[in-house]
Amino acid sequence: MAEKLAKNFSLDKQDVPSGATTMLLDSEDPKEQLLEECEEIWKQVEECQNRLTLQDVETLPDSDLKLSLLIKRFKALTAEFNQWQKRTPEIMTRNSDVLVALGRDQLQKLDHELEMVLSTVNAKNKKLKEDLIREQKWLEEQQQIIDCLNQTEEEMSNQVVYFSEKRAFQELKSKMLQIKAYKEDVLNALGDFLEEHFPLPENSGTAKKKRHSSEEQDVQLISLHEILENLINKLVNTPHDPHITITASFWSPYIELLLRYGIALRHPEDPNKIRLEKFDQ
């Protein structure tokens, strides 16, 4: 069957009138010539199909019909394969105008596609350059941060002081001694100021005699400095009970002076007790 199809196709090809080819060559538009050639070839294919349908159909034996059909199909495919192996590709048309027009059309399409590809590549390269510049800037900033951190680490490593409990205890003890020394200096300065500006009522500064109802006794008055020192020590040592009792050794004008200027306060329940005002609150 395949051999008959190839033979009929070759006969039909020979039957094509030469005037059709001459007409195609004389056509002015290459595209129209190509379409006309395709129509002529399609007409040849249709004629081959019509002739094949008019051929006598071979009858197959009833026994093992499927196997016979497969064998016929194998023979037909083999014959068609051999024909295609022997056949060389032919140019559909040899008209130079048609070929030039087709080539120009294909080149224009290819040029347009290449322009699109070039535009895409340029846009991608531009974006990559921007990304590269941004990444380089970020890298420089990170490098500057690393340099600053390394410099800080180096400076800190040069200033490291090894810590130990003994050293901390010694430093704390030294600070406490400094505070005590400062306290003594402040108290001494306060004592000198009070002795100069607030002396004892008698010129000798030793004692003052007071007479009570039934007996006479000598009472040793204490200075304003000692009164303030007692108030301070009481407040520091027993902050929960900072009051001290007013005795005969306390000169009353000094007590009134402290109370009037808000340096000392009386006990709300016992007027014979006073305490130092909490200036830190």
Image: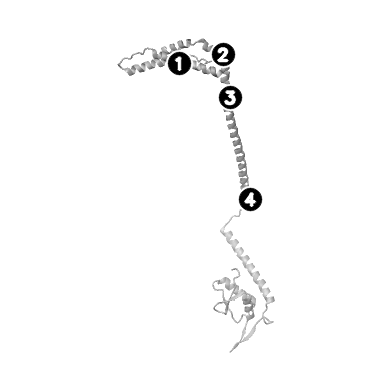
**Which three-letter amino acid code belongs to the residue tagged 4?**
Glu
Count of numbered marks: 4
Q: Callout 2: helix, strand or loop?
A: helix
Residue at the image point whose x is 60% and y is 61% from the top: 171
The label on residue 45 is: 1
Please rate how many residues cluster around mark 1, counting C-alpha atoms within 10 Å: few if below 14, some from 14 to 19, many from 20.
some
Residue at the image point whose x is 56% and y is 71% from the top: 237
Mark 4 lies on residue: 155
- Residue 239 in percent (x, y) is at 55, 71
- Residue 244 in percent (x, y) is at 57, 76
Q: Callout 4: helix, strand or loop?
A: helix
* Left/right of residue 47 with respect to residue 242 in the rendered view: left
Tell us which disc is closer to us: 3 or 4. 3
Q: Quadrant of the C terminus?
A: bottom right
Q: Is residue 158 above or below residue 258?
A: above
Q: Give 139 or 91, whichever is nearer the viewer.
A: 91
Please rate how many residues cluster around mark 2, counting C-alpha atoms within 10 Å: few if below 14, some from 14 to 19, many from 20.
few
Q: Are marks 3 and 2 in contact (CB under 8 Å)?
A: no
**Which three-letter amino acid code belongs to the residue tagged 2?**
Asp
Which callout, 2 or 1, points at the residue further toward the start of the chain? 2
Q: Are marks 3 and 1 in contact (CB under 8 Å)?
A: no
The label on residue 26 is: 2
Q: Is residue 191 above or below residue 171?
A: below
The label on residue 108 is: 3
In three-dimensional space, the C-alpha distance between marks 3 and 2, rounded to whole angstroms, equals 26 Å
The label on residue 188 is: none
Residue at the image point whose x is 63% and y is 77% from the top: 260
- Residue 138 in percent (x, y) is at 61, 42
